[in-house]
Image (tube, rainbow, N blue to C red):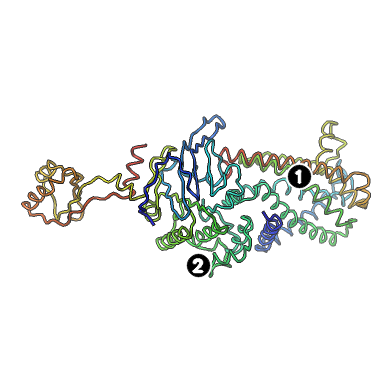
């Protein structure tokens, strides 16, 4: 699902073709209240999403991602800008926009815990104006493998199952856009894995998904594109592949068995080696690509010191590293 | 939007939750009945010495039981909002296609129906135990009670709107409840003129007077319609309800601006 080939426009560009969601130059300023000054939570954010695509929206606490998600859901009104779900403007046609939207914003808290799974589905289905709500509920119960639990009260279910019920409710109206706020928080490994499979299937069925999470591996596994929001502004947005290409520090990670003596480390440093680490009798260091000519020169002192060469790998950068650099640069 | 289906879903939910916890249901019925009997016998022992308690035990029983319903009408929206904000389900309701005010109104009507049935059951048992008899014409009773409820619902919606914005409004709610309780037991003629004029345009006061006429003095519904009393109550009730809906809708819009819709 991740690592698309598509080269996407920068966040500020005009993006008229997105068919699931368009967020156009949206700003949210919380008005002054009880002596508190006005607070700009989101400033000039623009992005779009196509059906079938998953966008990972990342950012530190207070960066503005929850505010952005809530504005898309219609729970918050933007101070300026425009949000369109499908063809419906959230501000001027909220009811129609809502009928195209599914959301799991507070995980298992969005459910009536005293009602059974089936009662929850039928109740929320009616609230969302779903026709043939019983049949649709039953379809989702089967699809999300909730058949053995349909008559159980939600409060009796495990967190993983509750999360699946929440997803089922969000899918009742066959939404064009699904918002998932921290969907795997608190789930065990197996439940989280099942949940990720479900999310992939939903996207394959043609639903656009905006996913916010602090779990980088979840975003990396699921997202077609990554948007990082910091200080209320969209800092970067691109496919993971493009981000990795942009943020990679070209070079080689060299691993040898044994410890480096101080003179040997000095010799390697003179050749450009850096980031020395030692763990479990293995020493690692990085030789930047600009110093690639030094790669062969580095082997000689290692050989002379009698250190076994374990591996030489081209260095890669993962999402967490990209995130740290983006946030570090914006903090 | 299929509003009848939405109402049916709210009604079904209300009754599922009522019968899902039988111990709570029985406890509530016993508590309601115990309170009715306490009013009938307890206040009966001292009531004749107090102003406002001089219309007989039947009047007291009716007045104070109706007070219960009125208090429920006033606090229902606020309590629902508080509960649903804490559980997180308010967020689901707020991002559903129907306006939040419509969902809350339907929930309240569903709650009214459950309460009316409980009220009739408690009154029937109380009448059986005490031997007291009302001239209960169910049609007049249900109409008057519903009009009163909708009027108070309007005030409840105003309180609910305040709860959306300011969250903790318990003091305002307690004041409203005390006002209702006071109107149920105090003789209006003992109030200052300006206050009397105010309370005469309060849906609870009008409804209580008509309910007493209907249930105690046996005045038929046709007579209450002919002399314009019902029309006056209906106008008052619908005015309060409309003001409540407008206030709630305004507060909902403000809450979406302030970001307080799903906070508690």
Q: Residue A55: where, in percent of width, then height?
A: 43, 50
Give whichever of B231, B124 is nearer the camera.
Answer: B231
Which residue, given by chain and number where applicable, does mark 2 sit on? A145
Quarter of the figure with the C terminus of chain A:
top left
Question: Chain under label 2?
Answer: A
Q: Can residue A118 be seen in this view?
A: yes
Image vertical order of residue A234 relative to residue B41, above or below: above
Which residue, given by chain and number where applicable, does mark 1 sit on? B152
Q: Residue A237: where, in percent of width, then height?
A: 39, 44
Q: Is residue B33 visible?
A: no
Q: Quadrant of residue B129?
A: bottom right
Q: Is residue A89 left or right of residue A291?
A: right
Question: Chain under label 1?
Answer: B
Q: Residues within 10 Å of mark 2 (few under 14, many from 20)?
A: some
Residue pushed farthest bottom?
A: A148
User: Image point 17% across, 56% down: which residue?
Assistant: A311
């Amino acid at each position: 699902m991740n690592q698309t080939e598509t080269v996407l426009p920068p966040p500020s560009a005009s993006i008229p073709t997105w068919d699931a969601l368009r967020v156009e130059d949206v700003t949210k300023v919380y008005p002054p209240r009880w002596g508190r000054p006005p607070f700009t939570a989101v400033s000039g954010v623009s992005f779009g999403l196509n059906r079938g695509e998953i966008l990972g929206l990342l950012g530190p606490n207070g960066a503005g991602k929850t505010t952005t998600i809530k504005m898309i859901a219609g729970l918050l009104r933007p101070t300026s800008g425009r949000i369109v779900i499908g063809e419906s403007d959230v501000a001027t046609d909220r009811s129609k926009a809502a009928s195209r939207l599914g959301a799991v914003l507070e995980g298992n808290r969005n459910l009536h815990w005293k009602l059974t799974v089936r009662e929850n589905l039928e109740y929320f289905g009616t609230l969302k104006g779903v026709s043939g709500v019983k049949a649709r509920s039953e379809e989702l119960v089967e699809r999300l493998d909730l058949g053995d639990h349909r008559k159980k009260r939600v409060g009796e279910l495990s967190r993983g199952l509750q999360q699946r019920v929440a997803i089922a409710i969000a899918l009742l109206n066959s939404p064009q856009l699904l918002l998932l706020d921290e969907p795997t928080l608190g789930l065990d490994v197996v439940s989280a894995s099942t949940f990720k499979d479900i999310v992939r299937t939903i996207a394959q069925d043609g639903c656009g998904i905006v996913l916010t999470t602090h779990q980088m591996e979840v975003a990396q596994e699921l997202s077609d594109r990554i948007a990082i929001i910091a200080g209320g502004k969209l800092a970067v947005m691109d496919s993971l592949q493009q981000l990795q290409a942009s943020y990679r520090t070209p070079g080689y990670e060299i691993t040898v068995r044994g410890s480096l003596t101080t003179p040997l480390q000095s010799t390697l440093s003179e050749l450009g080696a850096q980031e020395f680490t030692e763990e479990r009798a293995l020493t690692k260091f990085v030789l930047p690509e600009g110093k690639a000519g030094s790669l062969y020169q580095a082997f000689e002192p290692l050989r002379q010191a009698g250190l076994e060469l374990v591996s030489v790998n081209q260095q890669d950068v993962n999402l967490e590293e990209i995130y740290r650099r983006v946030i570090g640069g914006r903090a | 939007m299929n509003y009848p289906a939405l109402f049916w879903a709210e009604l079904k939910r209300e009754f599922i939750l009522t019968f899902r916890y039988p111990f709570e249901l029985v406890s509530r019925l016993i508590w309601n009945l115990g309170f009715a009997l306490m009013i009938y016998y307890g206040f009966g022992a001292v009531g004749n010495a107090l102003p406002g308690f001089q219309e007989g035990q039947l009047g007291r029983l009716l007045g104070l039981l109706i007070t219960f319903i009125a208090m429920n009408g006033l606090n229902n929206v606020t309590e629902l909002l508080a509960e649903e904000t804490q559980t997180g389900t308010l967020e689901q309701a707020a991002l559903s296609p129907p306006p939040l005010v419509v969902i809350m109104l339907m929930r309240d009507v569903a709650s009214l129906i459950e309460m009316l049935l409980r009220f009739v059951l408690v009154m029937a048992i109380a009448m059986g135990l005490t031997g007291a008899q009302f001239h209960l014409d169910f049609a007049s009773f249900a109409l008057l009670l519903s009009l009163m409820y909708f009027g108070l619902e309007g005030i409840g919606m105003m309180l609910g709107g305040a709860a959306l914005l300011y969250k903790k409004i318990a003091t305002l709610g307690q004041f409203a409840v005390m006002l209702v309780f006071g109107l149920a037991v105090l003789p209006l003629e003992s109030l200052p003129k300006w206050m009397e004029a105010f309370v005469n345009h309060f849906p609870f006061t009008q409804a209580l007077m008509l309910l007493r006429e209907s249930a105690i003095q046996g005045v038929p519904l046709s007579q209450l319609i002919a002399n314009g009393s019902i029309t006056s109550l209906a106008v008052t009730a619908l005015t309060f309800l409309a003001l409540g809906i407008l206030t709630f809708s305004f507060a909902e819009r403000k809450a979406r601006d302030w970001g307080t819709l799903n906070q508690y």
